[in-house]
Image (cartoon, coloured by chain):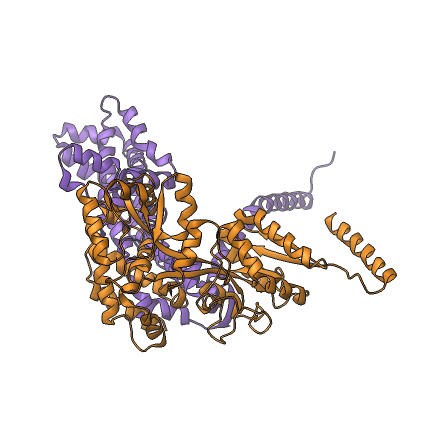
Chain colours: A purple, B orange
Amino acid sequence: MTAMTDADFRRAIRARTLRRNLWLAFLLLPPMAVMFIFIFLPMGSAVLYSVYEWDGLVRGDFVGLENFREVLFEPQKSKFLFNAFKNNVIVFVSVMVVQNGLALVLAMLLAREPKGYRFYQVVFFLPVILSTVIIGFQWKLFLNPVFGLVNNLLRAAGLDSWALPWLGLPETALPSMILVNAWHWVGFPTLVFLAAIHRIPKDYIEAARLDGASEWRIARDIIWPLMAPAVTIIVVLTFIGAFNWFEIPYVMNGLEGAPGYSTDMLGLLFYRTAFGSISATDSDFGAGSALAVLIFLFIFTVSLIFTRLLTAREIELA
Amino acid sequence: MNKRHTFTAKAVLAGAAMMVGSSAVAQTELDFWSWRQEDVAAYNEIIAAFEETHPDIKVTYTAHPATEYNTIIATALAAGEGPDIIHTRSYGGLEVLAKPGYLEPLDEQVDMSLIGDVAKIGTTLRADGHVYAVPFASQTVLVFYNTDIFAAHGLTPPETWDEFKAVATQLKEAGVIPLANGSAEGWMLEIMSGALLPNFYGSEFFGEVTSGATDFEDPRFVGALEKMAELKEFMPDGYQGVDYATMKQLFASGAAAMFVGGSFEIPGFRDAGVNFDIIAGPAAEAGGERMVATWLDGGYGVNAASENKEAALEFARFTASQEFGQMLTDKLGNISPIEGAVSSDPTLAKISELQGASTPYIMLVAYRFNTPTGSTLIQNGLQEMFAGSKTPAEVAHDVSEGIKASE
């Protein structure tokens, strides 16, 4: 055996690098192809569709930004967009306060490991694994004004005047849905917050306690700042979820955001604009695609801003 | 396999034709697409009757899922394919196919003299005034009433608005929900408006509003809405949250005595075992008009790019015949728009009779072509009216403005 020359050595290295790169390419190509076909291609075609006129499913002439002008500035169309947008904002703010606020309280309580906390942990998380469609239908039945569980209970408790057609009144329909959503999802942020609290080294909290800090002070000045990364994730996910909200309003009150568009969402508006609804409208792919592009751009930009702002206030744990 | 068989059959036929001379002709095969999956057996019988008189034509019926049919047919036609005979939708749904030129204009090639003009509106392209499909079945908005409950309370079906309210008041006092309808679903409110508004706004209104001589703020329309709003007190408690399924349940279970709905509800109520009869919406006053609102469900069109256009037209002519209308009525329980096709079923026969005084189901027939559609506007407006957030005059104003903006 002769010793390996420098040239041999370099060749061997090159061969190995090549093999490694080929291997990497082999592993990366299929998922990239899948992403290209199922994510980038549809996104690209939505952009393409949005600049054409459509006659049902038949593509007509190139119209530039005409579809965007229509959905944004023609009062009879834009009023739907702005109304839906307003409702999405309401959903985002309410979910942040009601659902995530409750989750934070629950997580803080569970973190103190009260008796049977593992049981509660499972119970709070259980609805998360159920299908949204099932939950929508189930709560729609519960809230039925004639034979629904909620009104029957209220009547049994002597609160007849409280037995409202919850989903039928413009003032109560959206709040009802937001509560149903909270019932469904509260377990998820609870679990994320709980995990974050568990990550905080126990000594910090014990040291504070020895120094005589109150529970409130500990929660505010130690736990809250140190769980910032979890809050970032939940805020961004809530934002995306709130602006893509579709299933619950669709299942519970239909495509038109009944009553009187009080539960209309950007997702519903996009769906019925693009694909039509059997009972009221025909499809308009151009306007629908324009809406899809606008919704995507909005969610993408704001999510980015949120992530930037919130990450800046995160404190790295040693 | 099938193809080879037909090919062999064709070859044999062709051979036979050459031998015999010109007496036998090769069979023309026609494809016929529809969304009526529940009607396959009946259509095959109807087609068999056609093939008996047209031995040179063979028709194959294919039914696609109803919810995807519009997309399937539009995609096929856009790709230059598609069947020879097309079961089309009506109004805006027909326009989507007729406007790009996929359908053959039929009015000069098919004798449709047995079909009334109201039905033909549904398959006429507004841009050129040609009829692009033979109208096939109509739906009618009716008032259903539970005959057992009416008998138990000694009531007779109301004929005028005052009688309607008197009957409803009596039922309510007896602890029966007078009207099963709720306002949770806009499209059911539009159906309800189809039964109640026309007898107040009158038979002239449709022509005048569609020609632009008046608009929806017309006192006749506002007045009709005001009357409709009077029904709130006869609807179930919490009617704002009563959805379609609950409405049907209330009527079918006998908890409610009356229900305003489309003729398409009849099979469901029969299956549920409820004893019912039908009437037209009440007249505004004694001796006033009593019209029912109707709309066309669809039609039979011919693919303009078909290679067997003559044979397909022959089939279209068959669908415009009295014989076909009678079969459609007998075998499918549909109300055929063809004159003289009368059903042996008493309820369907009664609907045909009520259609003697009919008015177009206004928003679907005339305002489903542009955004926002008339249906969107009236459904939303009525919902607001029943929720108490808008007055009839405000609703009429919104509808009128919306329609002007869409044109």
Residue A139 horizontal side relative to residue B37, left or right? left
Residue B97 % position (x, y): 52, 66
Q: How many marks?
A: 0
Residue lying at the far bottom in this picture: please name it.
B213
Q: In this orientation, which residue lies closer to the viewer: A154 or B167?
A: B167
Q: In this orientation, which residue lies closer to the viewer: A206 or A56?
A: A56
Give the quadrant of residue B11: bottom right
Residue A250 % position (x, y): 35, 49
**Is any part of residue B343 visible from this angle?**
yes
Question: In the rendered image of this protein, does residue A143 appear above or below residue A110?
Answer: below
Residue lying at the far top in this picture: please name it.
A115
Question: In the rendered image of this protein, does residue B94 appear above or below residue B171?
Answer: below
Residue B156 horizontal side relative to residue B7, left or right? left
Give the quadrant of residue A216: top left
Residue A5 % position (x, y): 69, 42
**Is any part of residue A278 visible from this angle?**
no
Question: In the rendered image of this protein, does residue A184 appear above or below residue B341?
Answer: above
Residue at left 41%, top 72%?
A: A66
Q: In this orientation, which residue lies closer to the viewer: A13 or A88?
A: A88
Residue B381 horizontal side relative to residue A44, left or right? left
Q: In this orientation, which residue lies closer to the viewer: B198 or A191?
A: B198
Residue A218 % position (x, y): 17, 34
Q: Quadrant of the C terminus of chain B?
A: bottom left
Give the quadrant of residue B312: bottom right
